[in-house]
Amino acid sequence: MARVKKKERQRLLLEQVKTKPFLTDEELAKYLEVSVQTIRLDRLELGIPELRGRIRNMAEKAQNKVKSIQSGEVVGELIDLELGHSGISLLRVTDDMVFAKTQIAKGHYMFSQANSLALAVIDAPMAVTGVANVKYKVPVHVGEKLIAKAEIVKVRGNKYFVWVKTHNETQEVFRAKFIMVSWGEK
Amino acid sequence: MARVKKKERQRLLLEQVKTKPFLTDEELAKYLEVSVQTIRLDRLELGIPELRGRIRNMAEKAQNKVKSIQSGEVVGELIDLELGHSGISLLRVTDDMVFAKTQIAKGHYMFSQANSLALAVIDAPMAVTGVANVKYKVPVHVGEKLIAKAEIVKVRGNKYFVWVKTHNETQEVFRAKFIMVSWGEK
């Protein structure tokens, strides 16, 4: 990208932060071809919190909305939720999540993240998992940040068809299709 | 069942313990229509350890065989393993495994038990999960003992098709079909 004027740069910065709220200042600087310091000054001027603050703000809003389970029961950190529609969670892969021999993350962590997120998006007082079809696309390692995005693609009575796609920083590592079953008064 | 003579009873007892090693003395007594004390005396005479001992013996043998992961990485207790063929694990559902609202076990525990067992049965130095199709048939609650049985139903090159069926005391609660992928020298 050719270097752009301040006004245009700040417009692009706002746009980036809105569509990809998990970019670090370093990543934003690289994308906009300016120094990290410039990004920090721009953020200050525009009133955009730093990455950690952005995630915290999103998380607080999201966690207050969860209905079918308790928000603390979401595996990873729930950072966005449109109840009855979609949700996003973040899971940092730590030492204790990998198999000792292969140093590859245990598949059940990606499943747990996706499964609990699929429950959290459902707009009903109670729900359970009925069916899950999952695919592991790329091995995951310590230090990776997994962003899972869930979307309700169909509702039939008390059955919810929920698709979850999980990315690391560079690619899709996992995807799941769930059928969840709800009960109780809406 | 009509009451049977001691010799026949002990034959039936041995048969039961062999085919259903997880029966308690109470269950064995009910099945054979004798007192629990009679069962205990029969076990002593026949040199059959009590339930806990039977499970411990099986577990020790099974855990020494695991190859693709470390035996401690099996979720639940690995109690039988025919490497390259089949395996059995036991998971006791405790307080911390259920959702607070519904008191129903979190689906990812059954998945984790099945997934790690499906890995453990594979006769290769390393393996990961490729695909999983799972079905939750009956909600599971605190106190239930889940017996998962895994069987390798097909092998194609380095791909293993593993079916896992999980029962509680009375019925099948969960089933899973996995495709696992192995690598490394056999």
Image: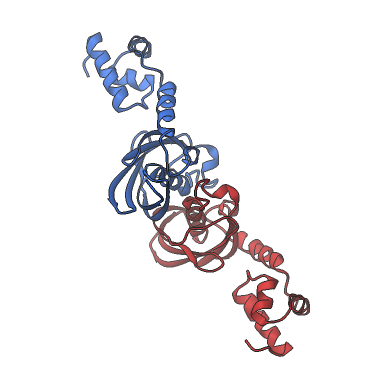
Chain colours: A red, B blue
Q: How many marks?
A: 0
Q: Residue at x 33, y 53 (%)?
A: B159
Which residue is more in the foreground, B18 or A104?
A: A104
Is residue B9 shown left or right of residue B25? left
Q: Residue at x 58, y 47 (%)?
A: A96
Which residue is more in the foreground, A62 or B183?
A: B183
Which quadrant of the figure has residue A50? bottom right
> Does residue B80 show up?
yes
Which quadrant of the figure has residue B13? top left
Q: Residue at x 59, y 55 (%)?
A: A71
> Can you give x and y, in whole percent of width and height, for residue B156 in the image?
28, 54
Which quadrant of the figure has residue B35? top left
> Can you give x and y, in whole percent of width and height, for residue A114 in the image?
49, 58
Does residue A34 lie above or below A185 as drawn?
below
Which residue is more in the foreground, B3 or B75?
A: B75
Is residue B139 shown left or right of residue B34? right
> Does residue B146 show up?
no
> Can you give x and y, in whole percent of width and height, for residue B73 in the image?
49, 41
